[in-house]
Image (cartoon, helix red, strand yellow):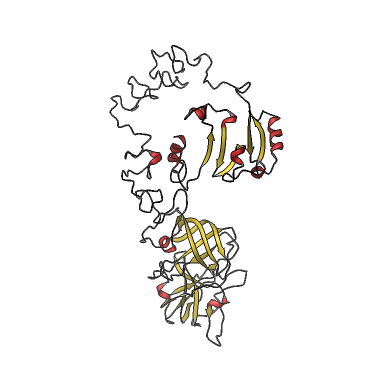
């Protein structure tokens, strides 16, 4: 059918183009009492349009149907007489304008409908002056070429303005428009079946993987997407988003790890940090309660306010992506938000800051997770010298010349405020809590606020 083929052409067959559970569809239903099958549609008058739905929402239809609680169109406006049939149209809630005003504006130019053949309509018969006059006894397809010399006598294929004759690229007796193998004069090509494009014996509309041959139609999670083409490990019938875990997204070796640009949903994650609500790199970090490696991810909101706070429990949908190897969710919609502000877990302890520094064994597994390092010393006051981006480097070895960068990306919410690198080399810091990040080719730890950095009593300098 047209909608199925259209969905296949644009790659949308997993959620549109067929009448299946959880699919999204715009549906028109026509009166089939007097006309059957396709004739009920092509021969219909305006009175024969029984119901129109957009994504399951009624827009127009017979009065009795629209008033049914099962359809839910009772609050729409009445059209008392559409060629003898009472209808309802949902104008006000769709446009904000009344039915009367829309009809009046339209009918000032053209009638809302005709009962029967419209008046003064242009012909739908293709016409080029002096070339052909439609179907005749000698020209059955109406293309201006007599059947006796027409290379496709049953298919409309006129001589185009740029050609001297009917198109026939392989030079055989059949024109391109009706040639089963238009590039092979011997007609030895294998012709695909448009109704079964993967040639597995199952027609497209009934095939749970219409583009991947799977004659057995195996579907382990029973969601209507066959195993041969189902990239989601959990049931997600129709166009519903794939439910997944943060670990599945973050760990490339996890079963069901999706390709980038996959739309996914995450349920019941906790906000562990929020970037400053300014600029074009806003967002927040979420983590599940497992505290296992790969259990945190960054949620990118761009120029939009994150709209969440640390401690909130959120469920969301978004697109999984990798931005310079940083895993993130983009184009996010938060579907649930528990406004609690207390995290049910603490930071994950890291034995040595080198483990999450550039090249560290835990940098990738702990990316975007809330962690804690113990006693360290500042070993480089300005990690970006001669430039200065308020970053400094710490190590658990005070004699080291390298270590873990401490970054002010999160704790930098106002000019001349937040985290700074003004403290000297050698300063002891008792504890640092923050989010593990990777940016500009460096592993970094990003404290969220002043309480995330603990200094010894009587410390001579504060990095705030």
For residue 420, say whether it is visible: yes
Q: Nearer the viewer, residue 282 or 16?
A: 16
Q: Quadrant of the N terminus?
A: top left
Is the residue 361 above or below the residue 199 in the image? below
For residue 282, say whether it is visible: no
Q: Nearer the viewer, residue 44 or 319?
A: 44
Is the residue 300 above or below the residue 75 in the image? below
Does 276 sit left or right of 225 as displayed? right
Count of numbered marks: 0
Is the residue 71 above or below the residue 293 in the image? above
Residue 458 figure quarter: bottom right
Q: Could you tell me residue 354's position as x and y percent?
A: 41, 74
Residue 13 figure quarter: top left
Q: Could you tell me residue 6's position as x and y percent?
A: 46, 37
Q: Could you tell me residue 456's position as x and y percent?
A: 52, 85
Q: Quadrant of the C terminus?
A: bottom right
Does 109 sit left or right of 240 as displayed? right
Q: Say which residue appears at 71% left-offset and 33% top-offset.
A: 104
Q: Could you tell me residue 235's position as x and y percent?
A: 42, 54
Q: Say which residue appears at 54% left-offset and 44% top-offset.
A: 56
Residue 62 figure quarter: top right
Is the residue 118 above or below the residue 399 in the image? above
Does 236 sit left or right of 97 as displayed? left
Q: Residue furthest bottom?
A: 458
């Amino acid at each position: 059918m047209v909608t199925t083929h259209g969905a296949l052409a644009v790659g949308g067959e997993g959620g549109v183009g067929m009448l299946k559970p959880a699919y999204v569809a715009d549906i028109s239903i026509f009166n089939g009492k007097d006309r059957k099958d396709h004739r009920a549609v092509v021969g219909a008058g305006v009175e024969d349009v029984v119901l129109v739905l957009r994504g399951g929402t009624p827009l127009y239809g017979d009065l009795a149907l629209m008033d049914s609680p099962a359809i839910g169109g009772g609050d729409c406006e009445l059209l008392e007489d559409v060629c003898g049939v009472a209808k309802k149209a949902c104008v006000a809630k769709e446009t904000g304008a009344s039915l009367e005003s829309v009809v009046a504006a339209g009918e000032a130019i053209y009638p809302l409908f005709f009962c029967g053949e419209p008046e003064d309509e242009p012909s739908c018969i293709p016409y080029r002056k002096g070339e052909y006059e439609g179907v005749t006894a000698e020209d059955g397809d109406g293309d201006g070429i007599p059947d006796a010399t027409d290379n496709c006598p049953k298919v409309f294929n006129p001589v185009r303005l740029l050609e001297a004759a009917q198109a026939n690229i392989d030079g055989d007796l059949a024109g391109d428009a009706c040639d089963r193998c238009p590039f092979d004069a011997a007609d030895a090509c294998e012709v695909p079946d448009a109704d079964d494009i993967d040639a597995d014996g199952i027609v497209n509309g009934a095939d749970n993987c219409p583009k991947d041959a799977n004659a057995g139609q195996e579907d382990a999670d029973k969601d209507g997407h066959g195993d041969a083409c189902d990239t989601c490990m959990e049931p997600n019938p129709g166009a519903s988003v794939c439910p997944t875990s943060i670990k599945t997204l973050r760990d490339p070796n996890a079963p069901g790890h999706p390709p980038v640009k996959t739309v996914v949903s995450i349920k019941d994650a906790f906000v562990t940090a929020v970037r400053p609500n300014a600029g074009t790199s806003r967002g927040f970090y979420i983590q599940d309660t497992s505290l296992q490696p790969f259990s945190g991810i960054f949620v990118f909101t761009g120029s939009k306010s994150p709209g969440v706070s640390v401690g909130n429990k959120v469920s969301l949908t978004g697109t999984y992506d990798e931005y310079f190897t940083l895993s993130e969710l983009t184009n996010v919609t938060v579907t649930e938000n528990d406004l609690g502000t207390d995290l049910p877990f603490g930071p994950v302890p890291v034995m040595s800051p080198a483990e999450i520094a550039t090249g560290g064994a835990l940098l990738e597994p702990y990316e975007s997770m809330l962690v804690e390092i113990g006693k360290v010393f500042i070993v480089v006051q300005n990690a970006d010298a001669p430039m200065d981006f308020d970053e400094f480097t710490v190590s658990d070895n005070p004699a080291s010349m390298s270590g873990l960068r401490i970054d002010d990306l999160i704790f930098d919410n106002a000019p001349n405020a937040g985290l700074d690198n003004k403290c000297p080399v050698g300063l002891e810091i008792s504890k640092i809590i923050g989010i593990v990040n990777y940016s500009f080719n460096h592993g970094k730890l990003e404290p969220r606020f002043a309480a995330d950095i603990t200094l010894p009593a009587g410390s001579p300098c504060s990095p705030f």
